[in-house]
Image: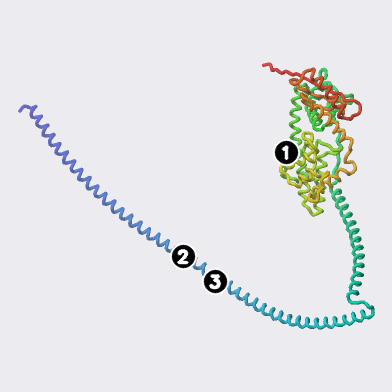
């Protein structure tokens, strides 16, 4: 054999031997692996048995503990139940003892009652015997009197009854007159004391309203700025506010005149802001007046809330509070209506409490009795009817509604709070210095001047100025022409002559303005 063949043969033998060795090694490894798996499985089984035994012992311990706990709880419950039963037994024994003692007392009382009944029976027998003896004596005396007077029993009885009737009638009449007089004096005295006490305890101050307000200015140069070029600024102020601005030689002040205190206050506040700001021209004036009107609305709401808080009236509707605030700017015979309402509320409460009625309801009726005066410009009818409708609309009770409706001329006994409110209203209005009729008539004339003017077609606003000697009417430029504006002016003047009575003359001025605005970008 050549060397190459020998090498091939040796390689083949080596491969066969290697294959045999590999098979033997694989089988040996597989045997060892099986032995390890068996031993591991045996170890796992033993551990599982140990864990099962441990858990079984823990379960037995836990069940024993639960059994002991239940046994202890049962013993506690049993002891509590036994103690409760013992307490009930003791209570029953006490009650039995009490019943026994009461039974003995009742028996004693029964014996006492029996003894008293025997005594009463004996007394009744004695009284009956004495009554029989008295009847016998009276009968004997009656017979003797009949024999002496010569009258029968019926005749004597009739004559005696007639004499008694006459005497009783006279005595009854005199007693009734005496008591009526005495009661009248007492009622008169009590009513005077009640009213005087109420008025003395509520001595409210009175402020007489005026129709002008003054605005302080820093120097006379400011007067010229308020007037403006050719008077455009002062005309703009008077147009948008409806007041009369008076600028004279008086140093340091400008006078604002108007019969409507709301408009006068708006104009005064707007002038104060314009003077402080320094920018005074028509567009700025309109802007400041609009902002001032918003502030006045907030001020009105604040006044209404303060009035309600002052008299401790709560739960009012928001609109009712706003109407109350408007009363601050309303006067009646120069008397501030809001202060008058507060005064009537206090008086009503004091009178009601002294009469034993509900003071809280009375003060509510008194505060709201003139609420219609805050809205009578915008509705038909007198302020009692307007106020009653408003209060009913906003959920007030029937007593409060009728107090507003009937405090002037519809007094009813079934509404005592209306009578109290009317009494307090009379006390507030009739005290010295409370009212002046001239101012109320003046305000009514101003309202009539404006109402007649605004009733014409095309009229937007109307303002009575110069104490009613002039009426300025603003008409819509879209609904009127220059010719129709002149006709409206003439018709308003003629209507004033027909409907109103006034001293002197009234100047009617109709203003028609077309305004265009553009912005340069």
Residue at the disc numbered 3: 86
Identity of the residue furthest to the top in this view: 520
Residue at the disc numbered 1: 319
- Mark before the other along the chain sequence, 3 or 2: 2
- Going 49% across and 67% down the picture, which residue do you hit? 78
Horizontal arrangement in the rendering, residue 454 relative to residue 520 (left or right): right
Looking at the image, do the residues carrying marks 3 and 2 touch, with CB atoms under 8 Å apart? Answer: no
Question: Which residue is nearer to you in this view: 161 or 48?
Answer: 161
For residue 72, which numbered disc appears in the image? 2
Question: Which residue is nearer to you in this view: 372 or 165?
Answer: 165
How far separated are the C-alphas under marks 3 and 2? 21 Å
Above or below, 253 against 407 in this view is above
Can residue 410 be seen here? Answer: yes
Which of the two discs, 3 and 1, sits closer to the camera? Answer: 1
Question: Which residue is nearer to you in this view: 316 or 9?
Answer: 316
Above or below, 129 against 410 in this view is below
Which of the two discs, 1 and 2, sits closer to the camera? Answer: 1
Identity of the residue furthest to the left in this view: 1
Q: Position of residue 18 (x, y in %)?
A: 15, 36
Looking at the image, do the residues carrying marks 3 and 1 touch, with CB atoms under 8 Å apart? Answer: no
Q: Position of residue 139 (x, y in %)?
A: 87, 81
How far separated are the C-alphas under marks 3 and 1? 70 Å
- Going 79% across and 43% down the picture, which residue do you hit? 405
């Amino acid at each position: 054999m050549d060397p190459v063949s020998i090498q091939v043969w040796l390689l083949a033998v080596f491969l066969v031997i290697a294959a045999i060795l590999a098979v033997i090694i694989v089988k040996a490894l597989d045997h060892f692996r099986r032995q390890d798996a068996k031993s591991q499985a045996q170890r796992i089984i033993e551990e599982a048995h140990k864990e099962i035994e441990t858990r079984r012992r823990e379960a037995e311990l836990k069940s024993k503990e639960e059994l002991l706990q239940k046994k202890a709880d049962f013993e506690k419950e049993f002891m509590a139940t036994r103690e409760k039963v013992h307490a009930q037994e003791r209570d029953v024994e006490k009650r039995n003892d009490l019943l026994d003692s009461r039974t003995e007392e009742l028996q004693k009382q029964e014996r006492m009652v029996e003894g008293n009944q025997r005594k009463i029976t004996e007394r009744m027998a004695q009284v009956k015997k004495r009554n029989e003896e008295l009847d016998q004596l009276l009968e004997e005396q009656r017979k003797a009197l009949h024999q002496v007077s010569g009258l029968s029993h019926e005749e004597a009885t009739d004559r005696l009854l007639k004499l008694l009737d006459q005497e009783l009638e006279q005595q009854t009449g005199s007693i009734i007159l005496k008591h009526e007089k005495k009661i009248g004096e007492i009622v008169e005295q009590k009513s005077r004391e009640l009213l005087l006490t109420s008025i003395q305890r509520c001595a409210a101050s009175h402020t007489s309203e005026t129709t002008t307000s003054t605005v302080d200015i820093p120097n006379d140069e400011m007067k010229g700025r308020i007037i403006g070029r050719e008077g455009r600024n002062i005309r703009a102020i008077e147009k948008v506010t409806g007041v009369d601005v008076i600028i004279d030689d008086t140093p340091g002040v400008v006078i604002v005149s108007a019969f409507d205190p709301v408009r006068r206050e708006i104009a005064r506040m707007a002038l104060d802001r314009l003077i402080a700001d320094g920018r005074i021209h028509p567009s700025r004036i309109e802007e400041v007046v609009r902002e001032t009107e918003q502030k006045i609305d907030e001020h009105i709401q604040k006044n209404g809330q303060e009035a309600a808080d002052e008299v401790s009236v709560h739960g009012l509707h928001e609109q009712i509070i706003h109407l109350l605030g408007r009363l601050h700017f309303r006067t009646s015979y120069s008397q501030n209506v809001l202060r008058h309402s507060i005064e009537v509320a206090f008086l009503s409460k004091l009178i009601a409490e002294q009469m034993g009625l509900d003071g809280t309801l009375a003060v509510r009726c008194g505060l709201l009795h003139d609420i219609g005066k805050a809205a009578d410009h915008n509705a038909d009818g007198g302020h009692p009817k307007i106020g009653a409708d408003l209060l009913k609309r906003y959920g007030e009770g029937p007593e409060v509604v009728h107090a507003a409706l009937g405090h002037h001329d519809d007094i009813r006994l079934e509404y005592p709070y209306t009578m109290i409110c009317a009494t307090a209203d009379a006390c507030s209005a009739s005290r010295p210095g409370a009212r002046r009729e001239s101012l109320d008539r003046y305000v009514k004339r101003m309202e009539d001047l404006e109402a007649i003017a605004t009733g014409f077609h095309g009229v937007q606003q109307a303002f009575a100025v110069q104490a009613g000697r002039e009426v300025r009417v603003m008409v819509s430029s879209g609904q009127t022409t220059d010719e129709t504006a002149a006709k409206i002016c003439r018709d308003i003047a003629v209507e004033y002559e027909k409907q109103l009575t006034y001293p002197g003359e009234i100047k009617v001025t109709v203003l028609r303005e077309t305004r265009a605005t553009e912005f340069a970008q």
